[in-house]
């Protein structure tokens, strides 16, 4: 190196190279993305994180093509950042790790160096104990260089590290465009998956590969758009209208969670003592079990004002799962929704509830179960969904949770559904409460009478009247007062006192309960 070269000269050379790899020097590529309704990888990061907080790693990476067709190509093109922009940043002042796929580089496919950057992002997030946010828009392995066993046979530790990260740091996947193959596998490990309706797709394989492998003709949205993956399959948690809404959802979600499983909770300032709720709450839940109501309105009243964030709102609507705050403390609400299937629990609700319990337990959020359940779905259609195993998954998660939990029976607490919602002493709840409208029994009254006493009432002079008499007599034995008399619940509370009682209980319990499992190495998940 010439002796008259200064340190400033070297700095300037590096800065010049860095500039050629940034968005300003790649106007045509960025404009092409804009024409497709997409932002660039770096713009997306800037929209998500606190202003001027992003510090890039691997920004000088370029990967030349050396795979299929590269030797015959007239021009060997570089891949700026190898299609992955990664680095640390802050969201609401808290450190995060973020990486963003660049669709303008080989369609966002993951090359060898891009994969190395994803692995580095995972390693840093795990080591430092900070959330990982994945902005996904592209394909899986870059076919041009993945079809070479010299490179591919080594595989890599990406999914090993995803498994290590699970439950240690919050992970968010934002599907902001094409997301078949690799991005979908990444998202499958995330705690929150957000899709933009009309823009995002997910799935194990895209239309071209599906056509080549199976002969099936389909398009990307039919195969894996938000209508499929958010609303019908529940693989994604939220379907939003724009990228900015996706970024806002990410910031809101992370606001309820600690930076990692050992970090302090994000307690928001809130006035104490907690005031009694007003009388309007009394009319939200009809006493008659034949009348439906929207349990989300109940949850919104009980939670700190404006704090309810529902997850998977358009999937398995018979069960509501939501993050919220009580007296400033982040909590998880899980509730039966009478407006959908009468609140009955089916296979999709089991999956939804089990995942939510695991999320809250991993990050130390107490669980509050609001019970109004007629039981589990029954019949041949229910059995075809593997409900026997998937229902076990829900109770499995309750049995492994170590966070505080409280149950509140709003109305029906019937059968195994009562157990699966943490009713009574089923999973050692820190408190078991009921509203005066609660009914608790092994199965629906009508079903019980028809199964156990059909012969008796059919032999009566007036079978219809006798059946109704038996139903009425049984109903007098399943109310909240009788449950309290038998000490199956701790107390019957005025609905208006629900919030204050919950805050009082959670103020006094330990953050984690001692492990009471035998000295095994692990449990075996039902599914």
Image (spheres, grey):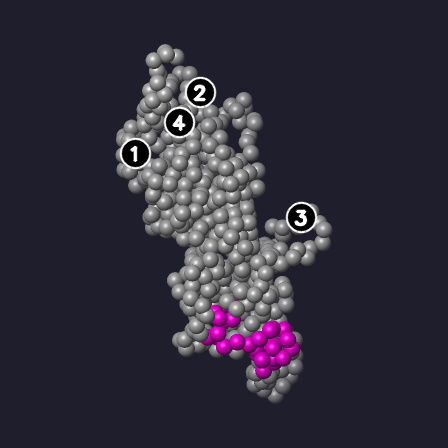
Residues under numbered marks 2 and 3 in contact, where contact means CB atoms less than 8 Å apart: no
Spatial distance from mark 2 to mark 3, Cα to Cα? 45 Å
Residue 338, placed above or below residue 364: below
On the image, the x and y values in percent for residue 454 come to 63, 78
Q: CA distance from mark 2 to mark 4?
A: 19 Å
In the rendered image, is residue 177 in sight? no
**What residue is pinned by disc 3?**
522
Please identify, in this view, whether the residue under mark 2 or under mark 3 is nearer the observer.
3
What whole-number distance in Å separates the C-alpha atoms at marks 1 and 4?
18 Å
Residue 66, labelled with which disc? 2
Q: Residue at x 48, y 36 (%)?
A: 121
Check contact, mark 2 vs mark 1: CB within 8 A. no
Residue 264 in sight: yes
Residue 292 locus on image (x, y percent)? 45, 71
Q: Which quarter of the rendering shows the N terminus?
A: top left
Reading the chain from its start, which is encountered first: label 2 or label 4? 4
User: Relative to residue 24, is residue 398 drawn left or right?
Assistant: right
Q: CA distance from mark 2 to mark 1?
A: 25 Å
Which of the labelled discs sits on residue 60, or is there none? 4
Residue farthest along the bottom direction in this orientation: 461
Magenta part of the protein: which range? Answer: 476-502
Is residue 477 inside the magenta stretch? Answer: yes
Membership of 42 in magenta stretch: no
* Label 1: how many Cα within 10 Å (few below 14, some 14–19, many 20+): many
Q: Tag on residue 30?
A: 1
């Amino acid at each position: 190196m010439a002796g008259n070269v200064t340190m400033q000269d070297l700095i300037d050379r590096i800065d010049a190279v860095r500039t050629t790899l940034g968005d300003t020097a790649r106007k045509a590529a960025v404009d092409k993305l804009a024409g497709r309704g997409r932002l660039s990888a770096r713009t997306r990061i800037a929209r998500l994180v606190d202003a001027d907080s992003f510090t890039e790693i691997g920004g000088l990476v370029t990967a030349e093509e050396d795979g299929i067709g590269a030797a015959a190509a007239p021009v060997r093109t570089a891949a700026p950042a190898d299609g992955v922009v990664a680095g640390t940043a802050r969201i609401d002042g808290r450190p995060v790790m973020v990486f963003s796929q660049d669709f303008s580089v080989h369609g966002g496919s993951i090359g060898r160096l891009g994969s190395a950057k994803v692995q580095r992002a995972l390693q840093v997030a795990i080591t430092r104990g900070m959330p990982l946010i994945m902005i996904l828009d592209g394909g899986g392995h870059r076919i041009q260089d993945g079809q070479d066993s010299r490179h591919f046979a080594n595989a890599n530790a990406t999914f090993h590290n995803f498994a290590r990260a699970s439950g240690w740091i919050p992970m968010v996947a934002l599907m902001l465009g094409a997301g078949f193959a690799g991005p979908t596998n990444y998202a499958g490990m995330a705690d929150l998956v957000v899709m933009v309706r009309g823009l995002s797709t997910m799935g194990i394989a895209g239309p071209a590969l599906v056509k080549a492998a199976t002969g099936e003709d389909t398009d990307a949205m039919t195969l894996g758009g938000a209508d499929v993956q958010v609303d019908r399959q529940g693989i994604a948690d939220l379907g939003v209208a724009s990228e900015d809404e996706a970024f806002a959802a990410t910031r809101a979600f992370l606001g309820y969670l600690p930076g990692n499983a050992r970090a302090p909770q994000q307690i928001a300032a809130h006035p104490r003592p907690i005031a009694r709720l007003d009388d309007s709450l009394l009319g939200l839940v009809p006493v008659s079990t034949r009348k439906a109501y929207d349990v989300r309105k109940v949850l919104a009243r009980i939670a700190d004002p404006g704090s309810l964030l529902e997850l998977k709102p358009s999937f398995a609507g018979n069960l509501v799962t939501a993050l919220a705050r009580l007296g400033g403390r982040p909590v998880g609400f899980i509730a039966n929704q009478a407006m959908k299937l009468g609140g009955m629990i089916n296979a999709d609700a089991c999956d939804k509830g089990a995942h939510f319990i695991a999320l809250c337990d991993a990050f130390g959020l107490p669980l509050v179960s609001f019970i109004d359940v007629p039981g589990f779905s029954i019949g041949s259609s229910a059995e075809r969904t593997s409900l026997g195993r998937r229902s076990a998954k829900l109770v499995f998660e309750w049995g492994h949770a170590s966070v505080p939990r409280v149950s509140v029976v709003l109305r029906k607490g019937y059968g195994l559904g009562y157990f699966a919602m943490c009713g009574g002493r089923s999973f050692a709840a820190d408190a078991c409460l009921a509203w005066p409208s609660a009914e608790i029994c092994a199965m629906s009254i009508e079903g019980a009478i028809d199964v156990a006493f059909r012969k008796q009432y059919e032999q009566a002079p007036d079978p219809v009247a006798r059946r109704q008499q038996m139903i009425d007599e049984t109903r007098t034995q399943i109310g909240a007062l009788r449950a309290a008399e038998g000490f199956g619940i701790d107390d019957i509370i005025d609905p208006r006192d629900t919030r204050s009682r919950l805050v009082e209980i959670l103020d006094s319990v330990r953050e984690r309960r001692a492990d009471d499992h035998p000295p095994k190495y692990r449990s075996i998940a039902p599914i």
